[in-house]
Image: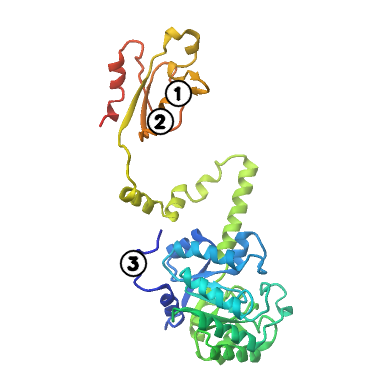
Amino acid sequence: MSKNSQKVISKCKQLRSLLESNELEFILEAHNGISASIVESAGFKGIWGSGLAMSAQFGVRDSNEASWTQVVDMLEFMSDATSIPILLDGDTGYGNFNNMRRLVVKLEQRDIAGVCIEDKQFPKTNSFIDGNKQPLADIDEFCGKIKAGKDSQTDDDFSIVARVEALIAGWGLTEALKRAEAYRQAGADGILIHSKLSRPDEILAFAKEWAGRSPLVIVPTKYYSTPTDAFRKAGVDLVIWANHLIRSSVQEMEKTSKAIFDSESLADVEDKIASVDHIFQLQGAEELSQAQDKYLVQKSDIHAVILAASRGSELRELTHDKPKAMISIGGKTLLGRLMEGLKRAGINKSTVIAGYKAEAIDLLGIEKCINEDYEKGDELQTLICAEANFQ
C-alpha cells in the first residue's frame, strides 16, 4: 500500500494545512480504496469522500440509502490505501447531534481527517435534485450539531466543515451569510458555500462578503468553466472536484461492457483498458511480495523433476492415446496423484519430462519439457532434458 510506514504529519494536520494554506488548494473525489489510491498517485494532497460517489458505487441513491456504517467501512479501506487526508461528505451528519458525536468518534478511529456536514434535514436528497424544494435545518439545531462534533473529537486538528445550502434552496445571499457566520461561531473549521448556477456569480459575491473570516471551500461542479484564477482572486481556500472519478469510471465501464457484449471477444478492448499488472500495482502487490520474502517461512525450495516420457506399452490399449502417467485410477491420474503428494510435502515447483503423447499432459501448475527421442534413449537421457532446471 502507499501508506507510509512512518507518519511524519498526521492526516488531520495535513487537512488543516490545506484549509489554512496561503495558496488555493485542491482535493479530488474518491469512492473506494482503488480510486483513493489513484487520487494520491495523481498528486493530489487530499481526497473528498463524496456522498454521491459512494452511494453510486453501492448502487443506491444519494438519499442516505447507504447507512453511515457502510460509508465508514468504505472509508476505512480508502484510508488504509492512502497517506493523504480524507474529508468526508457527511451529508447532514446522519441524524441529530448524538449521531454526529458518534460519527466523529468513528471517523477518528479510522484516521479520517475531517467531515463536512450540510444544513439540510435528514434524510437528505442530493442538492441538484429539486434543491429549492428542500427544507433547511434550523440554525440553532445545526449549530448544536457542530458543537457536539467538536466536543467529541480527540485530535485538535480534526476538521468540521459546515456546508451552507441557502443558495441551493433559493434563500439568497443574506441568509447564506447569516448561516455561515452562525456556524463559524459555533466552531466550524471552514465554510463550504454551494451553488447550482452555471456561473460563479453567487459564489464570488459570497466570498467578497465573507472576506476571509474562516477557510472558504467551494464545489464548482456546475460552474466548472470558470477560470480557476477567479477563485484565487476571490480568496477561496479549497476547491473540491466532487464527482468526476465515479462519472468517468461509469462511462468507461458502460463503453467496455457494450463492446465486449457486441463483439463476443476481448480483442477490441484489451489494449484500451488498464493492465492486470497495473491493478496489482494499485493494490500494493509488490509490498506483499516483499513481506512474504521477509515473514513467510518457506517449507521447501526443492524442485521436483518427474519422468513421464514413456508410453508404457505393456499396458496396451490403456496408453493408446496417452502416456502411462495420465492413466486415471479412481478418478485421478497417476501424475495428478503424484503432484498432490509433492504439494503436501511442500514441494510446489515441478517439471514433467514428456515424450509420448506429450500434449495429453495438461495439468495446471507444472513446467513441461519434451524429450523428442524418448523411444531411443534411457531414463538418464530423459533426465538430461530438464538439465536447465537442476540447482
Dot 2: few (<14), some (14–19), or many (≥20) neighbours within 10 Å?
A: some
The residue indicated by pointer 2 is 366
Residue 87 visible in the picture: no
Residue 168: percent from left, percent from top: 67, 80
Q: Which residue appears farthest toward the left when viewing the image?
A: 391
Dot 1: few (<14), some (14–19), or many (≥20) neighbours within 10 Å?
A: many
- Residue type at mark 2: give it: Ile
Decide: is 368 above or below 37. Answer: above
- Give the mark, 1 or 3, whose residue is nearer the N terminus: 3
- Residue type at mark 1: give it: Ile
Q: Which residue appears farthest toward the right when viewing the image?
A: 133
**Is the residue under label 2 in contact with that under label 1 (CB below 8 Å)?**
yes
Say which quadrant the C terminus sits in. top left
The CA distance from mark 1 to mark 2 is 10 Å
Asked whether 300 or 90 is in front, the reply is 300
**Colour mode of the rendering:** rainbow
Residue at x 58% of width, y 77% of height:
100
The residue indicated by pointer 1 is 361
The residue indicated by pointer 3 is 6
